[in-house]
Image (tube, rainbow, N blue to C red):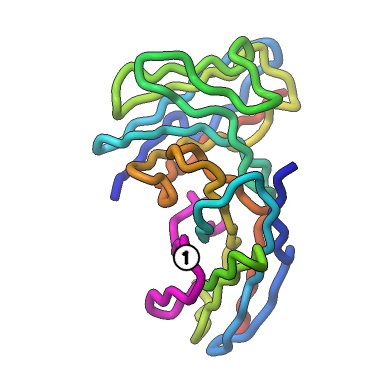
Amino acid sequence: GQSLEQPSEVTAVEGAIVQINCTYQTSGFYGLSWYQQHDGGAPTFLSYNALDGLEETGRFSSFLSRSDSYGYLLLQELQMKDSASYFCAVKANQAGTALIFGKGTTLSVSS
Amino acid sequence: SAVISQKPSRDICQRGTSLTIQCQVDSQVTMMFWYRQQPGQSLTLIATANQGSEATYESGFVIDKFPISRPNLTFSTLTVSNMSPEDSSIYLCSGGTGDSYEQYFGPGTRLTVT
């Protein structure tokens, strides 16, 4: 089967740093993406890793270790507006097919 | 990037009826997908909408229940047929280009079946 595991909930305070981990077991692997979804909103793309290492985009960074089937999303200088659900997603086929999503991590940022 | 619109945004339907959801993309995308999401849950892929041909369905989803059309590169419809309360969910359309690791999602259609 195909599975992606991530924590169900994470809490933090404004200004802090939080890391959301994702481990995956899929039949194929062509990259790990991260999406943010606010309550009642559409998922929006945050970042993508196809190769090992760290990708940085402003306050958000994403890391991938293919040998460990593991990645994480790092959110720095947390703001209240970062309270949302975060999904990791694997591109399991090369031919442009859809993504397999994890169950999502709900991040709550308090003041 | 692409902007995706869906309609209706929400609907309440009687069991046994059908609802067609429309998805419009503002620019051409190679791939279009339909997902289902229970509130607070993950996204489950229903099917890949193929232009001018039959959609590709994931395990557990069948064409008779979820017929899909994609007459051109920017438009697709999903019909939820013979609805039951178990079909109550949020239905999301998405589009992507190239490698499709980056997908753009519509705002979703919140369906309640009574």
Report the predominant secondary structure element of the magenta stretch: strand
Quadrant that contains the C terminus of chain A: bottom right
State the image coordinates of residue B4 (x, y, percent, origin top left): 36, 40
Q: Amino acid at mark 1?
A: Leu
State the image coordinates of residue A53 (x, y, percent, origin top left): 49, 75
Does dot 1 land on a helix, a strand or a loop?
A: loop
Most extreme residue toward the front, as rendered? A67
Q: Residue at x 44, y 21 (%)?
A: B77
Q: Nearer the viewer, residue A110 or B78?
A: B78
Q: Residue at x 43, y 39 (%)?
A: A96
Quadrant that contains the N terminus of chain A: top right
B47 falls in the magenta region:
no
State the image coordinates of residue A85 (x, y, percent, origin top left): 60, 61
Q: Residue at x 45, y 55 (%)?
A: A44
Q: Is residue B61 above or below residue A11?
A: above
Q: Residue at x 50, y 58 (%)?
A: A33
Find the magenta span and give its range. A35-62
Residue picked out by circle 1 = A51
Q: Is residue A35 visible to us here?
A: no
- Which image quadrant for residue A7? bottom right
